Image: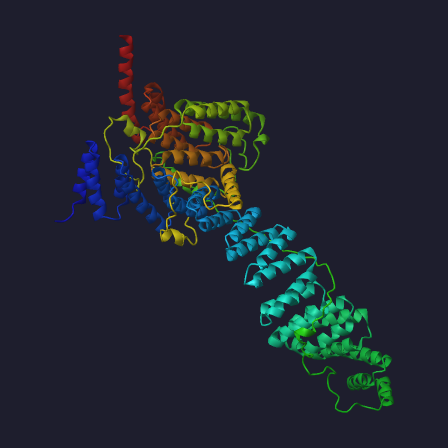
Amino acid sequence: MAFDKAKVLKAAEKFLSQGKINAAIKEYRQLVENDEGDLTALNMLGDLCVRASKTDEAISCFQRIAEHYCQQEFTLKAIAMYKKIDRLKPRDPYIAHKLAELYSTQGLIVDARAQYLVVADAYNRAGQTRKALDVFHKIADLDPQNTDIRLKLAEGYLKEEMKTEAADAFVDAGRYFYDSRNYEKSLEAYSKALALTTDKTGVLRGITAAHVALGTADEAVELLRRAFWERPDDPELLSMLVDASLEAEDAKGADEATALVVKENPSEYTRFVPVARLYLKLGQLNETTRLLTSIVEQMLSGREEKELLSIVNDVLVQNPEQVEALRLLVRINWWQRDMDALRASLERLAEAAQAAQLVDDERYALTQLVRLAPDEQKFLDRLNELGGLQEEAEETLIPSTGLTEVPTFQTFAESVDEGVIETTQPNEHFEWEVVTAEGHHDPSASFADLNENFDSAATTVASEFETNAVTGSGNSSQPQGQSHAQLDGDDASRREAMMRQELESVDFYLAQGYSDIAGDTLEMLERQFGLHPEIQSRREALQAASSTHAAPQSNVFEFGGAEELVAESKPVATEMPMEPVPAFEVVSEVQPKAPAAFEISSEVESKVTPPTPTNNAPAAVGLDAGLAEIFEEFRLAAEEEQPSSNEDYETHYNMGTAYKEMDLLDDAIHEFQTAAGLVNPGDGTSRYLQCCNLLGHCFVKKELPRAAAIWFQKALDAGGQTDDERKALRYELASVYDLMGESGRALDLFSEVYGIDVGYREVGEKIRRLEKEHSKTKIKKKK
């Protein structure tokens, strides 16, 4: 018999309306078994299992949904679902590890660290110190600048005889110390790594860089020489030795090391050029020309005559009669076929050779000059004095023997000249271009429908917005990052009124026992308005309330919009909102941007669940004092650290939306309030309005219409709305007043909407119903 999904679903809803939870669970099990892709039914089954105290089955359902979202790279939805599991099974290491990985992909460093600490604590209690250290390493990777933690982590690895991991940690610390220009600590960390690792090349590179930055490159040379004795076949090590010798201004050592490099790879002949320049800098002109003579033909063949000519000219500046340099100059001019320059260089060579009594050189130069300028009698006369034309005169006196004899490593110089090298690092410049698309509003759409257009604005948080006047004041809105202290006098009074209104909402939260929400609101107020006596008094009241009672927790199910709550209540099946929410709350789904390379940890995928800590397990099993100190520092950082700059408006808004879809309303409220605190009502965008709208919807779902009214009223008071948005806000606020039983205020607002648009969302029928109720109330009062 074919499976009739509609029939089974109808039976499940019937059982649910009758309060027969177990019977409804059986029906939903059939739905899930026959349609594994029905996430709505799977989520409903999980919720029903929670109500029936079948926690394990509920977790299994929610975990399947979370894993599906992970595979589809819906990271925020996966986080929301794992948070749902976390409430059923707090501090579970497996779930904590999943959450930590997902948080880290979203850049939520503080949250990721808190979850990793749960995993590390579980390993610690089980005495698995090595695995705890691996988790600490992941925590350290979240904050690369915390080098002190990395050093302590390395010491912890060392105590566990994990030398490879310890070396890696020391290398990481050394690299970050170097980047922060703390070269002495960088050298110390690299030196510790050198004693532990077998792959010394990378560590030696770091040590060399640190020595060069400290001006002690000669020490790096000695270290590299010893390493090269041990591994003479390592070309990278030899290359580092050349560079270090140049930095140490050890010209002879650099010369000999470069010769070994070129012997193995003749195409590296250009590495002699910086050595020649070093000889020149040290005033050793003969060594300079010797090196250039050995590579002149290769450089000319490689079209590198300009660099060669530059060095030769520098030599001649110091000694204009340096014969070897003049030979090179003649060869270069001959290669360039520059006859005028060639004649001039030959004349200089002839004069210098005559002064140095180098007959062969002078005779060669005069022979070439006679051929170039046969009319110049003086060249011929002098040539005749020397014995006439040189037979078979070649174009150049440069020998064709190639490179000089290649030295062996044993002939390296032992002395090292000290020198100071200045290092510069190029600045990197970034350009960011953000394009903002304007949205279009449908006049017939509800206010919640307008959220679909809000999503485009949420993606441009990091850009600069061009602001326009949104109220009658004619003032341009302030940039997001500008201080509130720069507002003019008129805005100051408005801000004071806004703060008072926010404080009223705090008073309401305190009266209702919602300490968490009150605390979040106070933090938002302190960020917006700074320290204030009124805020401080509420904080003291919050602390007093927290010490006497805790905020109530209850299982909350989504029953639709405020209009549906006005009707006669009846049991309704919970649905995970895979489609837009009905009635006036139609909020488009905010899809998070998938990371470029989303991966789930191999440890998690293989489901190697860390051992669950027991209540009677000692807190420091297998944990020495050093590791305990690391754990404590991480714990304190997780408690005290403020959210990083990466946790921007868009991140919190998207997280709030995901939590709301998962029916985690308290978490959604927290995220939306945080997002609202990161923006200003008059920043020229709809972001603040958007948060107020969704906060109102969340409180409606929690059946707290008074709190919802506060946020809808804030949205109206913020100003800057379009006519359609203002109309929709009045309608939402009227619906909330209707829920609260304040028919008079609801009737006034519905009448305003009716006066603008008589066909807006059946507002006429609502007015007629409220007028009847209002008239009945008056009659009762008269009686």
In the displayed structure image, the side of residue 393 where residue 23 appears, left or right? left
Can residue 541 be seen in this snapshot?
A: yes
Quarter containing the C terminus: top left
In the displayed structure image, the side of residue 768 where residue 511 appears, left or right? right
In the displayed structure image, the side of residue 319 where residue 272 appears, left or right? left
Residue for point 38% across, 33% down: 666
Residue for point 53% across, 44% down: 625
Can residue 686 be seen in this snapshot?
A: no
Residue for point 70% across, 74% down: 411
Depth check, front residue: 269 or 162: 162
Task: Report which quarter residue 255 is drawn in.
Answer: bottom right
Residue for point 26% across, 26% down: 567
Residue 198 position, x and y percent, is: 54, 63
Residue at the outermost left position = 1
Residue 352 position, x and y percent, is: 83, 78
Compared to residue 297, the image places residue 144 above or below, namely above
Depth check, front residue: 760 or 92: 92
Q: How many marks?
A: 0
Compared to residue 216, the image places residue 351 above or below, namely below
Task: Report which quarter residue 315 is drawn in.
Answer: bottom right
Compared to residue 322, the image places residue 249 above or below, namely above
Compared to residue 97, the image places residue 403 above or below, namely below
